[in-house]
């Protein structure tokens, strides 16, 4: 089955996301013999995590001073985008859009940056930040990553260029409230590009770091720390 996605690919080399699970808190009785119900009444209600604007998210992106030497920020190229078609993965065909091909997620507030590592050919690291309510941010991201890793091999057509995509689910890091990680291999024109994607949700902020596996592992913790503010 061949279905046309409703949106287009992001400027990065198919930069994407990850995340899963749900966190909660439990009230503890303050005195001996207090019932859970009474303790719950005394406990203050949890405040929903505040959403961050795109402007604030932009300030919390990694920059060259965070990454160190030999990194150059690449200019954004959002104007020239091709339509994306997903083939061979019904779950992703249903999702459509950028996320199906490893592109941007559909959340209201976002910011992104991509850096080339000048000491290694074809090495890049990209960061995407998103903010939305917890009940949308977690489940929305989870559905995309479960769909992607649920199809170990599928194809996307970007404009007129077919790209074979192989996915492998990886152990998620012990960071934030929820986290996902996967390895993707893009094959086109006889050339393979391996990319790691790791996403971490902390409250109402989602951090997605994508790119060369070694660079993702090197900069993930710093990205999460800075995104938390």
Image (tube, helix red, strand yellow):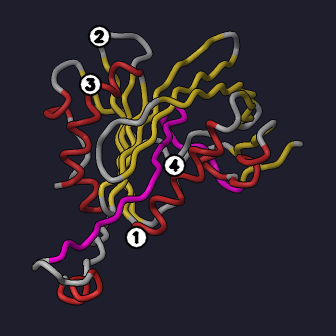
- Disc 4/disc 2 C-alpha distance (Å): 27 Å
User: Which is in the foreground here, disc 4 or disc 3?
Assistant: 3
- Placement of 93 over or under 56, stated as above or below: above
Asked if disc 1 and disc 3 are in contact, CB closer than 8 Å, the reply is: no
Residue sitting nearer the eye, 114 or 3: 3
Q: Label 1, on which residue?
A: 133
Residue 16 percent coordinates (x, y): 50, 41
**70 lies left or right of 118:** left
**51 lies left or right of 147:** left
- Disc 1/disc 4 C-alpha distance (Å): 17 Å
Whichever of callouts 1 and 4 sits on the residue coming sooner in the sequence is 4
| Magenta region | 6-29
- Placement of 156 over or under 207, stated as above or below: above
- Disc 4/disc 3 C-alpha distance (Å): 22 Å
Whichever of callouts 2 and 3 sits on the residue coming sooner in the sequence is 2
Residue sitting nearer the eye, 196 or 48: 48
Quadrant housing residue 134 = bottom left
Whichever of callouts 1 and 2 sits on the residue coming sooner in the sequence is 2
């Amino acid at each position: 089955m061949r279905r046309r996605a409703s949106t287009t690919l992001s400027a990065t080399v198919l930069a994407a996301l990850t995340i899963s699970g749900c966190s909660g808190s439990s009230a503890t009785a303050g005195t001996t013999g207090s019932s859970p119900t009474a303790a719950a009444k005394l406990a203050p209600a949890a405040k929903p995590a505040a959403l961050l604007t795109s402007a604030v998210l932009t300030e919390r992106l990694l920059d060259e001073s965070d990454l160190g030497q030999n990194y150059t920020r690449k200019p954004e190229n959002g104007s020239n985008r091709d339509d994306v078609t997903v083939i061979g993965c019904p779950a992703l065909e249903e999702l459509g859009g950028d996320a199906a091909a490893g592109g941007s997620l559909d959340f209201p507030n976002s910011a992104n940056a991509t850096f080339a590592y000048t000491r290694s050919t074809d090495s890049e690291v990209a960061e995407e930040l998103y903010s939305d309510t917890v009940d949308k941010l977690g489940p929305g991201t989870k559905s995309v990553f479960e769909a992607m890793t649920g199809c170990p091999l599928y194809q996307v057509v970007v404009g007129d260029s077919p790209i074979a995509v192989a996915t492998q689910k990886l152990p998620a890091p012990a960071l934030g409230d929820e986290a996902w990680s996967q390895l993707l291999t893009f094959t086109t024109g006889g050339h393979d590009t391996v990319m790691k994607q790791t996403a971490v949700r902390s409250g109402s902020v989602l951090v997605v770091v994508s790119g060369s596996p070694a660079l993702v592992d090197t900069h993930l913790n710093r990205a999460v720390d800075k995104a938390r503010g």
